[in-house]
C-alpha cells in the first residue's frame, strides 16, 4: 500500500514545534503542537535535492516498522539498506518486497523526485483602494502571471479597510517609504520607476524559474476553521542567519478602487470608471503566521530538512476557497532566497 502524496509529505515532517512569535502582533490564535504520524505501508520523502538521502520504510497496519527480510527496489534494482541518493535530477520508482508470515509480499510501486530547486520570485504590492496609480501594479502582476507560474504575490494594503496593523512594522522592517504604489521584488528590490511609475514585467521574469539553492515544501490541513500548516526547507548549501516568513493572502475581495487610468487608452483600466466599482482586490495580506519580518531558522547543514508546524484559527470572515499561503526564506538582509505558495489543503513538495 502506498500513501497519498499529501500523507507522504506530512509523514516526513515528523514531530515539530512552532517557534515563538514576535511581540509586534497578537498571535493568540496560534498554538504549538506535535503531530503523531500515522504510518501504514511504504513511506518516504516525496521530493529531495540532489545528493540528499531518502529513507524508505514499510509499516504494517499496526504502524509497526517491518525491518526483517525486506528489500527496496529503486527503478527496479535492489538497493543496499533503506536509503538512496542521486546526483542527478529525475523521477524514480520505488517498491519493497518483504516476508509476511512466511509469504513474500510486495508493496505498490510509488515514485519520488530528485530536483534542483526552482526559484519562485516574490512580488509585494504596497497598495490601497484610495491609490489611483496602484492599478498599474495590479496590471503588471497579472501580466507576469500570464507568463510564468514561478511567482508568489502579496498585496499589503494601507489606509483602507483591508490594511493590517502590522503593515507599518513591515515597512519599517524592510525600509519601505510611506505612500503607494510601492512594489518590491524579493522583499528588497525596487520595482517601478517614473512618474507615474511603470512596472516592467521583465524585471520579475528575469528571476522567475531560475535555479535556487533553497527548496520549500508546504502542506496544510483544515478541520473546520482550525488550520495546521507544515513547512519544510532544505538547501544545497549550509544556511545561517536566515528567516522563515509565512503569510496568508486572500483573493476575491471586492472594493471600489480609485483609478487614474480611466482616460488612459494604453491601460487595461481605460474606461473602467473612477472609481472602479467592486474591483477585485487579489493577493491581499490577511495574516502573518510568523513574525512579519521572519522567524529565525536554526543554522542548517546542507541537504538537511528543517521542518516546522503552525496552527492557526481562520477567522469566520475569511473565504476558505480564496485563501493562499505564501512562504518565503529570506537572508540576513531580508532578500527572499526562494518562496513557495499554495492554496489551503494543497501540498507542494520540493520542486
Image (cartoon, grey):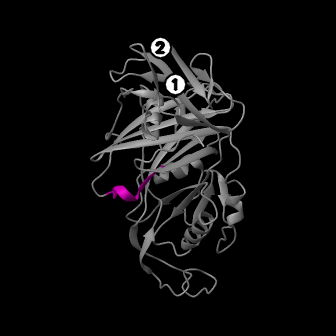
Magenta segment includes 274:
no
Closer to the camera, 79 or 88? 79
Q: Quadrant of the C terminus?
A: top right
Closer to the camera, 177 or 329? 329
Q: What span is colored magenta in the figure?
A: 318-325
Rendered residue at 53%/29% (across/down): 95
How many numbered marks appear?
2
Question: Is residue 79 placed above or below 186 in the rendered structure?
Answer: above
* Residue beneath disc 1: 96
Query: Which SS class for mark 2?
Result: loop
Q: Is residue 331 visible?
A: no
Residue 274: where, in percent of width, then height? 47, 83
Residue 270: where, in percent of width, then height? 56, 85
Which of the two labelled residues, at mark 2 and mark 1, occupies the earlier sequence position?
2
The mark closer to the camera, 2 or 1, is 1
Residue 45: where, in percent of width, then height? 53, 31
Report which quarter residue 338 is drawn in.
Answer: top right
Q: Is residue 220 visible?
A: yes
Badge 1 density bin: few <14, some 14–19, many ≥20, Cα 10 Å: many
Report which quarter residue 160 is drawn in.
Answer: bottom left
Determine the CA span between mark 2 and mark 1: 11 Å
Rendered residue at 39%/71% (across/down): 254
* Residue beneath disc 2: 67
Closer to the camera, 204 or 241? 204
Rendered residue at 67%/52% (across/down): 209
Question: Is residue 347 placed above or below 158 in the rendered structure?
Answer: above
Query: Which SS class for mark 1?
Result: strand
Residue 284: where, in percent of width, then height? 45, 59
Magenta segment includes 319:
yes
Amino acid at each position: 500500500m502506498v500513501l497519498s502524496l499529501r500523507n507522504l509529505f506530512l509523514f516526513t515532517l515528523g514531530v515539530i514545534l512552532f517557534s515563538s512569535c514576535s511581540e509586534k502582533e497578537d498571535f493568540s490564535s496560534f498554538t504549538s503542537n506535535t503531530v503523531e504520524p500515522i504510518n501504514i505501508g511504504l513511506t518516504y520523502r516525496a521530493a529531495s535535492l540532489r545528493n540528499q538521502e531518502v529513507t524508505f520504510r514499510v509499516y504494517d497496519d499496526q504502524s509497526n516498522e517491518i525491518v526483517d527480510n525486506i528489500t527496496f527496489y529503486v527503478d527496479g534494482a535492489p538497493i543496499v539498506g533503506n536509503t538512496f541518493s542521486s546526483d542527478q535530477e529525475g523521477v524514480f520508482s520505488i517498491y519493497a518486497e518483504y516476508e509476511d508470515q512466511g509469504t513474500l509480499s510486495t508493496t505498490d510501486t510509488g515514485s519520488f523526485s530528485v530536483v534542483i530547486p526552482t526559484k519562485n520570485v516574490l512580488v509585494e504590492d504596497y497598495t490601497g483602494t484610495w491609490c489611483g496609480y496602484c492599478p498599474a501594479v495590479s496590471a503588471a502582476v497579472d501580466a507576469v502571471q500570464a507568463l510564468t507560474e514561478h511567482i508568489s504575490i502579496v498585496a499589503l494594503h494601507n489606509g483602507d479597510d483591508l490594511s493590517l496593523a502590522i503593515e507599518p512594522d513591515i515597512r519599517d522592517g524592510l525600509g519601505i517609504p510611506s505612500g503607494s504604489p510601492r512594489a518590491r521584488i524579493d522583499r528588497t528590490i525596487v520595482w517601478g520607476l517614473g512618474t507615474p511609475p511603470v512596472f516592467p514585467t521583465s524585471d520579475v521574469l528575469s528571476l522567475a524559474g531560475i535555479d535556487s539553492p533553497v527548496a520549500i515544501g508546504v502542506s496544510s490541513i483544515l478541520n473546520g476553521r482550525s488550520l495546521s500548516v507544515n513547512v519544510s526547507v532544505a538547501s544545497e548549501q549550509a544556511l545561517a542567519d536566515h528567516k522563515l516568513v509565512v503569510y496568508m493572502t486572500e483573493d476575491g475581495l471586492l472594493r471600489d478602487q480609485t483609478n487614474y487610468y480611466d482616460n488612459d487608452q494604453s491601460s487595461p483600466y481605460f474606461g473602467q470608471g473612477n472609481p472602479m466599482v467592486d474591483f477585485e482586490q487579489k493577493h491581499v495580506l490577511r495574516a502573518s503566521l510568523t513574525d512579519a519580518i521572519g522567524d529565525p531558522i536554526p543554522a542548517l547543514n546542507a541537504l538537511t530538512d528543517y521542518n516546522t508546524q503552525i496552527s492557526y484559527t481562520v477567522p469566520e470572515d475569511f473565504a476558505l476557497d480564496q485563501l493562499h499561503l505564501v512562504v518565503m526564506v529570506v537572508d540576513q538582509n531580508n532578500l527572499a532566497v526562494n518562496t513557495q505558495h499554495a492554496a489551503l489543503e494543497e501540498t507542494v513538495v520540493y520542486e
